[in-house]
Amino acid sequence: MRIHIRAEALVFVYMVICFSMLIFNLFAIGKNHVRERFIEKRRRQWLTLIEQQLARRDCSQAKDEQHRRFLNKRFRYLVELIAFQQAAAELQVRQPDTLYVYLKQYRDCFVKVAFRLARKDLVTQAYMVYVIGQFRLLNADFEDELTRLVLQILLHNSVYCRENAFQALVASGNPQSVTEAVLLLSRNEIQHSQKLISDDLLRFPGDQNALAEQLWLRMDELTPAYQCALINYFRMVGPQFAQPLLARLNDPRQDSEIHFAVLRYLRRWPDREAYPLLLKLLQDESRSWEYAALAASALDSYPGSQTISHLKQALHSRFWHVRYNSAQALLNLHVPLAQLQDILNGPDRYAREILEYKLKENAGGEGLPDDGSD
């Protein structure tokens, strides 16, 4: 049996659906507007209250308990925590030391709300660990209950939970907590951005050298991806890892990505013992082209006639990236144009074109620079 539906009925149903969506959107916009106005009002009230607490001279236990009960009562509602966080963030800029003393004094209130919000959705958990990191609420004690909670959230599938939890652990200033966080991510084979890890580690508020040394001691327990992230971090810390990293570059059992990270390290922190190996890698086409390309880039930190000679020879490589990096390295070494005439006037078209391209690029696209021979 066929069912006949008139066109007017379809239009009516469509109009009802559109009208319902319009009503829903208007309701959502109105609700968000009211919520934002409420948070702004509460932010101003929290700002006044916190300033009064920071200026309070009466440090009696009764006053402390009264304020603690007030915080515990207010923090039952997420909007109150958001308003408090915004007010405290403003004071964090103006008087950070006084604010941190206040937050440490009432840290138990934040511990309670953290365990309660840890049972909520992932977005709420991500916000909660963000607040913990922003106000450095983790103790230096690795066995602290709040630290263990943040380590659990670190293993969530949500990248926001994971990143905010890692930032909170870094902000604690405890090298042991940070090291354990990296080990946990590696052991559970969680793929996290290498750049985020290295950038977060550079925000460590304590002794960077102490953190780097502790991380180095656990390097062999990490997957290649996390080893690369740490080598990128070491590159920003200092030259003290040049020798042990050179040993890894000479070890054929190491992953190629680790070798590449070491080559970048040796460019930033030159080591004379690495120089012969860099020259060898530049000429070795039996390996993947990345070795020669990165060796060419690294050699701009090792000036000398031998370096210039090998880089000019690498301009004849069959790999474009090797030729490109070699040409750039020659320009970074400020090689006089007269020493490059044999390439510019030579028979190798590819070597000539890549060098001309880099010369024009460095000259702002206005043609080859004058060699001063006139």
Image (cartoon, rainbow, N blue to C red):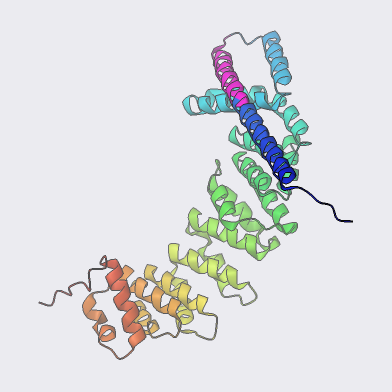
Q: Can residue 98 be seen by looking at this rendering?
A: yes
At 51% from the left and 26% from the top, the residue drawn is: 90
Where is residue 351 shown, x and y percent of the image? 35, 83
Q: Looking at the rendering, in which quadrant would you find the N terminus? A: bottom right
Q: Is residue 304 magenta?
A: no
11 and 157: which one is in front?
A: 11
User: Would residue 208 be found to the left or right of residue 344 on screen?
Assistant: right
Q: Is residue 333 visible?
A: no
* Foreground pick, 272 / 307: 307
Which residue is situated farthest in the left direction here?
Answer: 374
Tell which of 342 and 347 is nearer to you.
347
**Residue 4 image offset from top left, x and y in percent:** 81, 51
Q: Quadrant of the C terminus?
A: bottom left
What residue appears at the point 65 percent right and 57 percent down from the top-left corner? Answer: 217
Q: What range is drawn magenta here?
A: 34-57
Tell me which residue sits at (40%, 82%) in the image: 314
